[in-house]
Amino acid sequence: MPTGLTTWPSWLPGWWSTADYDVAREVLQRGVATLLCLAFLQALGQFRPLLGERGLQPVPAFVARTRFRDAPSLFHLHYSDRLLVVVAAAGALAAAAVVVGLPQAGPWWATTVVLLSCWAGYLSIVQVGQRFYSFGWETLLCELAFLVAWLGSPDVPVPFLLVLAARWLLFRLELGAGLIKWRGDPAWRDLTALDYHHETQPMPGPLSWHAHHLPRWWHRTEVVGNHVTQLLVPWLLWLPQPLPSVAGGVVVLTQGWLVLTGNFAWLNWATIVLGAAMVSDGVWAALGGWVGIAGAAGDAPAPGAAGAPTAPAAYVVVVGAVVLVLLVLSARPAANLASAHQKMNASFEPLRLVNAYGAFGSVTRRRDEVVVEGSLAERPGPDDWREYAFRGKPGEVGRRPPQVAPYHLRLDWVLWFVPLGVSGPWIGRLCRRLLEADPAVLRLLRRDPFDGAAPRWVRLRLFRYRYTTPDERRRTGDWWVRHELGPLVDPVRLADLAGRSA
């Protein structure tokens, strides 16, 4: 490799870059860009009724009481629903460009600029998203977007430091989830957690009923498999190949089971992308997979060989600086893993560059659901109430739970937390918007029982749900059995809410 002001000496690629992760770069960049595109499109469809100027948690009110340095966001400078549309649409287009490989055809910095713009746009949305963007996969997508932005294009070799950074992210993601379970709930230690989980998870999928009714010995096996995958397998990431490839493959398989049995937005898919990126080009070639990509990667020249891509000095300096920043910011997340008071899904700095992850540190034993109803009657009797139908969360007992992931139904998810005591003023605003027959909010639902007419009354009731047994399912055709626990919000009219914030 020639030396000078634009390239580094010939000895540098031997330790700085690698020729064994070209497939991993493609998987990471295009996989993360696909998820970013989906996330931006979701913002176009859901952000305004939930968080817009007339949303359930309006962004203007949030930024008025929040300092910029605590939640850096473009929308601190100015928020309007129109600007949100511009940011989300531009982000979706930029991410789609990476999916099809447009910026990768240019210099290394073109891909970096495009992906960093996606990161900044989505971070701006998450920072003001409040309850509706408070999930671990939002932070994970922000961290992933920032990380993969520095992988450059095929014109430069893959920096091995970034390969290690990706391993560190998967290590925190899996080990953090495993430790929070082991520390958080005895059901994970006595192997009974999966006796409940398939039934009580926030949003079951079409196969969740079947998974719940698998034999108890299988549920014990699931828990043991979870502990092995999340507590032991991540350590393989720090050993020589092919062991990191084995770890990545195990993660992909176990996350695939979670995709089949639940709806966790893009959490499982992001983890699958990370797991697949742990597999080296040599292993892909040996497995005969990724024909055309892995084959080309397997024939690629080693770093420093004739015909191999070279690392411009600017690229080496920039990547080195980024990795140094990530290393410094890793201190608190690393300490969190070792802490007896481990935090779950936590950020330790406002840009969410290196975070703590985890899921289901406690498992709910019973399923309570909010049922939202309205009435057109002036003085409604017991038979005058009609139920609003949601797109994903359980409602009618005869409706099979749908597959919605990797799409994220934010209102449905947040309503799952209400019976657990996680609520707020947005519940009152939801009632108000239903009483107004607000079209934007009604579009978030699967069915409006009043076909766009404004009801006179709205109420919220709490029901206990459980799956039907196989015998009950054969006799009734239902997936659920439910009984009422009591009122959550007593019947209200629009006049009752007149004095509250619009």
Image (tube, rainbow, N blue to C red):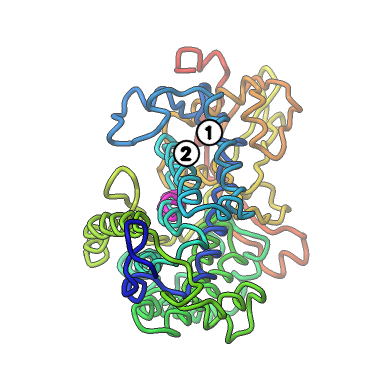
454 w.r.t. 43: above or below:
above
Residue 270 drawn at (x, y percent): 51, 60
Classify mark 1: helix, strand or loop.
helix
Can residue 483 be seen here? no
Please tell me the numbered disc located at residue 87.
Answer: 1
Q: In the rendered view of the protein, which quadrant contains the N terminus?
A: bottom left
Among the two numbered marks 2 and 1 on one chain, the one whose residue lies closer to the N terminus? 1
Please tell me the numbered disc located at residue 121.
Answer: 2
Residue 439 drawn at (x, y percent): 67, 25
Instruction: Give the residues in magenta.
Output: 138-145
- Queried whether the magenta region covers residue 139, the answer comes back as yes
Residue 126 drawn at (x, y percent): 44, 40
114 w.r.t. 208: above or below:
above
Label 2 close to label 1 by CB (< 8 Å): yes
**Majority secondary structure of magenta residues:** helix
207 w.r.t. 189: above or below:
above
In the picture, measured across the screen, residue 226 lies left or right of residue 452, that is: left
